[in-house]
Image (cartoon, grey):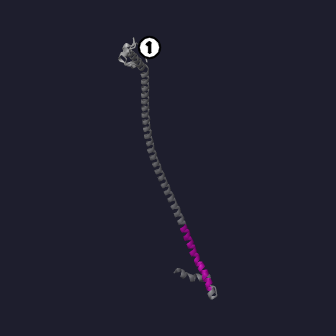
């Protein structure tokens, strides 16, 4: 069965067309060649390739590549700014840490000085209070000793009177008569002298 191209092109019985004798001479009957491999269309294909290449080159060089370059430059500028800011923040952080450590050292020194001053003040105040208390206790002890001595002297002074009274009562019970206070005192004086 003949193809529609062969009928339309005036195919003779031998399988050759009038116009396509050279086209089908190299290809077996019913086989069509891949268009880029056809030598008749090779020159126009090169022209279209050159036109497409130039159009693609112009599009890339004038539109796409400048946009890509501007994006890359913007990204590099942003990275540079970020690195610069990070370096600045790092130096500020280092300064803040150094300042904090200096303030901490100063605060510790002040706290130590305040603690020492407070300790010295409390020690001095405690010593003053102890001295004052000891003086008060010594005064009270001296006063108590003087009162005890006065009471002792008074008690010893009244012992003779009590002894005389008791002795008078004892003598009165023993002998039945009362002795005079003068006789009792004379009798007790030799006993008190021993």
Q: In this view, does 109 lie to the left or right of 146?
A: left
Q: Magenta stretch?
A: 144-171
Relative height, residue 144 to residue 127 (above, below): below
Mark 1 highlights which residue? 7
In this view, the residue in front, 98 or 25, is: 25
x, y percent for residue 88: 43, 33
Q: Residue at x 62, y 83 (%)?
A: 169
x, y percent for residue 8: 44, 13
* Residue occupying the far front of the picture: 13
Relative height, residue 9 to residue 90 (above, below): above
Residue 155, image quadrant: bottom right
x, y percent for residue 26: 35, 17
Let me know if residue 42 appears in the view: no
Main SS category, magenta section: helix
Q: Which residue is drawn at 62% across and 87% down?
A: 174
Residue 19 magenta-highlighted: no
Q: Residue at x 55, y 70 (%)?
A: 148
In this view, the residue in front, 43 or 28, is: 28
Q: In this view, does 21 lie to the left or right of 191?
A: left
Residue 92, image quadrant: top left
Circle 1 crowding by C-alpha within 10 Å: few under 14, some 14–19, many from 20:
few
x, y percent for residue 158: 59, 76
In what element is the residue under mark 1? helix
Q: Is residue 9 left or right of residue 157?
A: left
Q: Which residue is drawn at 57% across and 71% down?
A: 151
In this view, the residue in front, 57 or 141, is: 57
Q: In this view, does 9 lie to the left or right of 136?
A: left
């Amino acid at each position: 069965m003949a193809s529609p191209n062969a009928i339309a092109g005036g195919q003779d019985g031998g399988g050759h067309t009038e116009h396509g004798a050279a086209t089908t001479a190299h290809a077996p009957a019913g086989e069509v060649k891949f268009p880029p491999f056809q030598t008749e269309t090779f020159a126009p294909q090169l022209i279209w390739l050159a036109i497409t290449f130039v159009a693609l080159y112009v599009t890339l060089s004038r539109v796409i590549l400048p946009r890509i370059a501007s994006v890359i430059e913007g990204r590099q500028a942003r990275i540079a700014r970020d690195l610069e800011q990070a370096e600045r923040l790092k130096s500020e952080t280092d300064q803040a840490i150094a300042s904090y450590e200096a303030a901490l050292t100063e605060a510790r020194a002040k706290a130590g000085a305040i603690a020492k001053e407070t300790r010295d003040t409390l020690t001095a105040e405690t010593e003053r209070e102890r001295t004052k208390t000891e003086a008060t206790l010594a005064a009270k002890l001296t006063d108590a000793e003087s009162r005890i001595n006065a009471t002792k002297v008074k008690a010893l002074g009244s012992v003779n009177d009590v002894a005389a009274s008791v002795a008078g009562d004892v003598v009165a019970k023993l002998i039945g008569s009362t002795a005079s206070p003068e006789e009792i005192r004379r009798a007790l004086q030799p006993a008190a002298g021993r």
